[in-house]
Amino acid sequence: MQGGYKYRIMERRNGGGRTMEYKYILSIPKPLLNDFVNNRVIPFVGAGFSKNADIPKGLTMPDWNELGKLAAAEIADYMYDNNAIDALSYYEDLYSRTKLVEFLMKELHFGKIQPGPTYKAFCELFTGTICTTNFDSLLEDTMTLLHRPVSVVVTKDRLTIGNKDESKIVKLHGDFNHPDRMIITENDYDMYIERNPVFATYIANLFITNTMLLIGYSLDDDDFRGIWQIINSRLGNMTQPAYCITVNASQEKIARYHRRNIRVINLEGGAKDYKTILQDFFVELKDYIDKERDRTAESTNEKINEQMIIPVEDNKLCFISCSMSRISQLSAMLNPILNNFGITPVRIDDMLMPGDNWIDISSTAIRKSKAAIIDISDATPNVMLELGLLKSVKSGKNILMICEKDKPLPTSDLNGQLVLYYTFDVPDKKVEYHFKKVLSEWICEVYGKERELYSNSEQGIFSDAHRLFQKGEYSACIVSAYSELEYQLSLHYIEPYPKKDGFSHFRLNDYLKSDIYSDIPFSKEFVSLRNKIVHQRYVATEKEALEFMDFVKEIYEKARRK
């Protein structure tokens, strides 16, 4: 099916639903979609992608062949025959390597073009390794605008340098900041593998376990042929297909790609809409990936897993963002207050597994949490990235910024915004009182806990569960009712179990094993139902939700009469 057709995806959760319209997803083969979700796609960005930049009025961005024509125009008596590499090589022979680099900087408008919305959508989609043969800095400039930590690799010495939490941009052909590493002429291409054996092996190895996605290349590009030469020299004929994104390609062109074991994702539309089409494609694909990752998100903490079953607008998750150096102290300060309101804090380390991409997991944790508290005392790259992510998906009232007293704000655009201050080293009772008061008021406003704290009615206490039931979210209804019962019993009626890690803890399952509640029918079965939902993603029925609500109300009434 061609990408121009629209179709509806109905996401249903226990009878509830959300309708979403996708235009391009059916153009993508399911195995490739799975690779996207599992972060196993490596994009290769070519010269054609630079046309998506914001270009000053009156200027145009040449592709590889057009660049060859421009070079040929500056060479007397030279007849251009659509061989860009020959024209550029001749230009160097006549005028020197320095003049050739200067020519490229001028014609590619280095320093004048800026990354546009399509670049932003692309970099929000790809958070791991990005390979490119382009000389410009548009990709890394976009990462900077997104507050994304990034490592730029131009030489083999940089391959092992960089933080695992950073995005990595691999510049196969050098860039304008490293003119001695630029691959431009025939000799450069011919000697590439011989001069860069480690680099070539690294690139080839990427595609042993990942899928290649070509963007901005044509089959006639010397850059494209160079990439294929690298891979074939190391891997031979690839058994796993690569993919290429095109816009309104002819069947003849698609067949040419297919003969090289490259599958084409052909998006409908005209050349004049190239920027918009790609931007919409990236945005749509990210939306699909985010939903799939949210659906399968897991934590090492059972309470977090429990709350992630509940829709984000109804759950009790609060994302905590701070620098690593402050985690211990902030947890000791925030957790007792959050726990007192039945709010479950979630940090990136609660969900990050070995081999996970930090940015992807952080984004998922933020999307799955109803609200967030972010400490801006230390403007580390990770904190600034998470601040940007939060602002893009959460309303202002659902983000609480905190900062150590007397610390400067990291950016000027935070001036005038509400920031709650605290102290660590020097106790300040006034600051401490104000912090707890404002934090408690914020929790009540965002999570609606004030009504529940002072309500003795079952309807008031289990209002979230009732609302979820009315929406047809039966699994979420059961989890919410169980969680609220556990919270209410620990808060009002039962002494908590001995403290663990400095905090009191209570588990409803242990409580139900007591002799007092042995006469309640099917207690074990109801707890088992809740566990199946949390751990096995079981989808509950309306009947099961109704029976479970009766069960928790009976437990609650017995506790009140105890």
Image (cartoon, rainbow, N blue to C red):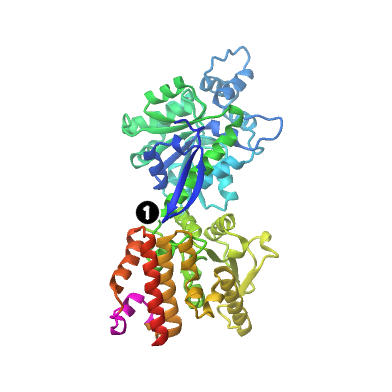
Give yes or no for residue 61 being in the magenta stretch.
no
> Disc 1 marks which residue?
355
Name above or below for residue 512 compared with residue 274. below
Foreground pick, 181 / 422: 422
Query: Count of labels shown?
Result: 1
Give yes or no for residue 515 being in the magenta stretch.
yes
Name above or below for residue 20 compared with residue 86. below
Foreground pick, 364 / 268: 268
Classify mark 1: helix, strand or loop: loop
Q: Is residue 502 visible?
A: no
Q: Going by the image, does 274 lie left or right of 529?
A: right
Foreground pick, 139 / 171: 139
Q: Is residue 235 visible?
A: yes
Q: Going by the image, does 269 lie left or right of 111?
A: left
Q: Quadrant of the C terminus?
A: bottom left
Which quadrant holds residue 103? top right
In the picture as drawn, the residue positioned furthest to the bottom comes out as: 562
Q: Quadrant of the N terminus?
A: top left
x, y (%) of residue 226? 43, 28
x, y (%) of residue 196? 41, 36
x, y (%) of residue 297? 40, 57
Measuring 29% from the left and 79% from the top, which residue is drawn there? 513
Instruction: Point out the stretch of residues depicted in magenta.
Output: 499-519
Q: Few, some or many C-alpha atoms within 10 Å of disc 1 (few <14, some 14-19, many ≥20)?
A: few
| Identity, as a three-letter code, of the amino acid under mark 1 | Gly
x, y (%) of residue 55? 66, 35
